[in-house]
Amino acid sequence: MGKVKKAIILAAGLGTRMLPATKAIPKEMITVFGKPLIQHTVEEAIESGIQDIQIIVGTQHQEIIDHFHGEGRAKEHAVKTNNNQTITELKASELPANIEFTTQHEPLGTAHAVLQAKTFIGQDSFALLFPDDIILNPEGPNCTTQLTNAFADHEANIIAVETVPPELIPFYGIVKLKENVELSETSSLFPVQDLIEKPTLESAPSSLGIVGRYVLKTEIFEAIENLKSSPNGELHITHALSLLSGTNREVCAYMYSGARYDTGRPTGHVLANFALAWEDPLAKQELSKYIKQLIVKTD
């Protein structure tokens, strides 16, 4: 079975959950522990062995393109002042991948955004990553690697899922497993019968919520092209996958290992910063001191 070497990263959203921070800059350029969110996502893809990446941007997202392809003020000043240390640091931060961009001219949903990369993907299966989600797994492979490994063993459309609390179910895409399939500690991969976008708690078929990591086969493009727009004119990747599962194309849910932080909301963004800082020895020392001070104040 083929190795996954291409990825699509969706970065065309409006970032309304992070206003007013996103009034003038894309949410993907907001930093998480000193690094733009979009770079965390690209690095995850590269770490999983992916070599070719297409980032889908909106019409006002030039900053993302400049971050990867532009010279930047820091390099310009370093060259002008012969600051070799800064030049070396900037060169070391260059990423070993082919990163391309295409524009989604209107915010018409996640499936519509994926469709913009159809030519780039060609006949290859690919990973799909949403930068809102930072998923950390310090003791093992990252989430995208887990999915690509699962795909190598079982070539199907694979969706990362996690168990979500009841009060959050209406905010997620939820999967319905096939009949007589139950979660098991001996397996991470489960066949899916259907996917429902943001169901009510009463109508949800399970508590397995979809998170922003997928490995998809090219049949997804045909499914997207056959979708009917939702009332607001958008096309969603959940609906396209539901269409595939309804035509007996194999879709599987993967219970990934790791901790996920939703950086698309302020609290999740703070927690992601904390989690990444905790992995840095010096930052961890400062945080530990601060936490102790907080505990003393609240006692």
Image (cartoon, helix red, strand yellow):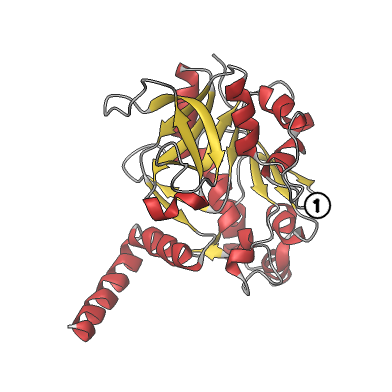
Q: Residue furthest left?
A: 299
Q: Position of residue 14 (x, y in %)?
A: 69, 60
Which type of secondary structure does the marked residue at label 1 adopt?
loop
Picture residue at 49% right of the left edge, 40% below the top: 174
As drawn, 138 above or below 58: above
Q: Which amino acid does label 1 sit on?
A: Glu
Quadrant where the N terminus is found in the figure: top right
- Other-residue count near label 1 (Cα within 10 Å), few / some / many at <14 / 14–19 / ≥20: few
Picture residue at 65% right of the left edge, 46% below the top: 10
Picture residue at 22% right of the left edge, 76% below the top: 292
In the picture, measured across the screen, residue 214 lies left or right of residue 65, that is left
Res 142 seen here: no
As drawn, 186 above or below 88: above
Q: Where is residue 178 in the image (x, y as percent from the top left)?
A: 44, 23
Quadrant where the C terminus is found in the figure: bottom left
- Residue nearer the viewer, 7 or 232: 232
Q: Give the residue pinned by disc 1.
A: 106
As drawn, 185 above or below 128: above
